[in-house]
Image (cartoon, grey):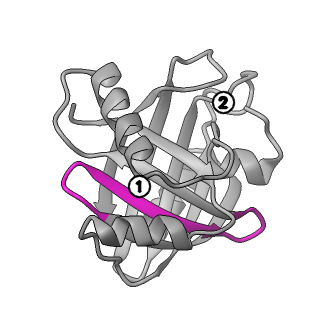
Amino acid sequence: MQYIEVEKKFALPEPAALKAALEGLGAKPSAPTRQVDAYYNAPHRDFLAPAAVSEWLRIRTEACGSSINFKRWHPIEAVIKTHADEYESKIDDVEAIRRLLEALDFTPLVTVDKTREEWKLPEVEVVFDHVDGAGHFVEFEFKGDAEDVEDATAQLEAFIASLGVTLGEPINRGYPHILLGREH
């Protein structure tokens, strides 16, 4: 399932119980890192035009380097997405990429400034995010072997349920949606 992302996101007002459960599984946290994600709109189609946004183009800048990423969430017209096509690559010169996008008439949409702490397990990556202006969240991303999206989703949901931890409300939209005041 290369280039496909299956994840579940939740609000997380109190992360201590979840971190304790992850420690019980042998997971260790990474050092928290700051990520600044600049999102862009395309000149040839407005990513914000559909009732349910399904596409994002992002440049991420952090201490360990920069990357460019495009996600297309599926099902395209659905409010609740099940997975995304994800294409990401490291970039050496972030300013050159910003200028390239501007030269091609891509326009800035929103910047997401967050602090992220990652916990890795063999089948699942768990990240704790504090997003400036939006709050605390946890994302569970499937990293194991699966036959298809449905299998990956079932395995991810089983993992989350096995933790026995109360999470906040499920979040079915990205951080740009939240900061732009979009419901979908």
Q: Using a 10 Å C-alpha cutoff, classify the residue at mark 1 as few (fewer than 14 neighbours), some (14 to 19) or many (20 or more).
A: some
Amino acid at the residue labelled 2: Val
| Residue 73 percent across, percent down from the top left | 50, 29
- The residue under the point 52% across, 17% down is 75
Q: Name above or below for residue 175 compared with residue 132.
A: above
Question: Looking at this view, is 92 or 139 the one in front?
Answer: 139
Is residue 74 found inside the magenta-colored segment of the image? no
Q: Are discs 2 and 1 less than 8 Å apart at CB? A: no
Question: Looking at this view, is 103 or 155 the one in front?
Answer: 155
Q: Name above or below for residue 34 compared with residue 60.
A: below
- The residue under the point 30% across, 33% down is 155
Name the quarter where the C terminus is drawn: top right
Residue 116 horizontal side relative to residue 46, left or right: left
Amino acid at the residue labelled 1: Ile
- The residue under the point 37% across, 29% down is 153
Of callouts 2 and 1, the N-terminal one: 2
Q: Using a 10 Å C-alpha cutoff, classify the residue at mark 2 as few (fewer than 14 neighbours), some (14 to 19) or many (20 or more).
A: many
| Residue 164 percent across, percent down from the top left | 46, 51
The stretch in magenta equals 120-135
Question: Looking at this view, is 172 or 10 the one in front?
Answer: 10
Q: Residue furthest right?
A: 181
Name the quarter where the N terminus is drawn: top left
Residue 69 horizontal side relative to residue 37, left or right: left
Label 1 sits on a secondary structure element that is strand
Disc number for residue 68: 1
Residue designated by label 2: 53
